[in-house]
């Protein structure tokens, strides 16, 4: 996450995008006091989308620009929230007589 106050420009977004790529981050959030300009939005769009392995077609923008005002008004970043059952291993079931063994 990067937070900027004062005047921000598309170069700030470009710099942040390179940090996201270098650090291999799935998603980066750029917080600012000012509304993003069109060039800033275009630069953020070039970062593409993060698509989790089990959610093909349900990607979220890799670089998101949020203003403090939008956060205070309830806007939240787009983040993948749910993992399918295939991502979790289920423990094997034990029979009743195996569970009643001695602890020590």
Image (cartoon, rainbow, N blue to C red):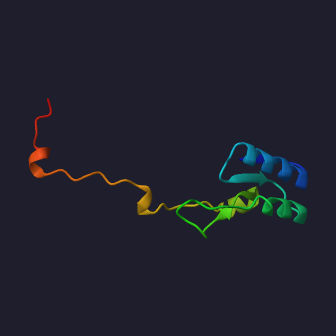
Identify which residue is drawn at 80% across, 59% down: 44
Examine the rendering and report whether any part of residue 6 can be seen: yes
The front one of 38 and 90 is: 90
Quadrant into which the C terminus falls: top left
- Horizontally, is 29 left or right of 11 in the view? left
Where does residue 19 sit, x and y in percent of width and height?
77, 44
User: How many circles with numbers are drawn on the protein?
Assistant: 0
Q: Position of residue 59 (x, y in %)?
A: 63, 65
- Please, which residue is most extreme toward the bottom here? 57
**Residue 52 vertical placement versus 94 (above, below):** below
Provide residue 93's location: percent of width, then percent of height. 22, 53
Q: Which residue shows up at 18% across the image and 50% down it?
A: 94
- Residue, x 88% and y 66% (percent of image)? 38
Which picture quadrant has residue 98?
A: top left
Up/down of 24 relative to 75, above or below: above
* Residue 75 seen in this snapshot: no
Front-lying residue, 31 or 101: 101
Which sits in the foreground, 12 or 22?
22
Q: In front here: 67 or 94?
A: 94
Residue 67's spot in the image, x, y percent? 77, 58
**Residue at 14% of width from left, 51% of height from top?**
95
Residue 87 quadrant? bottom left
């Amino acid at each position: 996450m990067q937070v900027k106050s004062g005047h921000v420009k598309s170069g700030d977004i470009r710099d942040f995008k390179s940090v996201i790529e270098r650090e291999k981050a799935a998603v980066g959030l750029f917080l600012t006091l000012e509304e993003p300009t069109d060039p800033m939005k275009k630069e953020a769009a070039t970062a593409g989308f993060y698509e989790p392995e089990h959610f093909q077609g349900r990607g979220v923008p890799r670089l998101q620009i949020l203003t403090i005002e939008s956060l205070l008004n309830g806007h939240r970043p787009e983040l993948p929230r749910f993992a399918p059952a295939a991502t979790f291993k289920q423990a094997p079931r034990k029979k009743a007589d195996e569970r009643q063994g001695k602890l020590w």
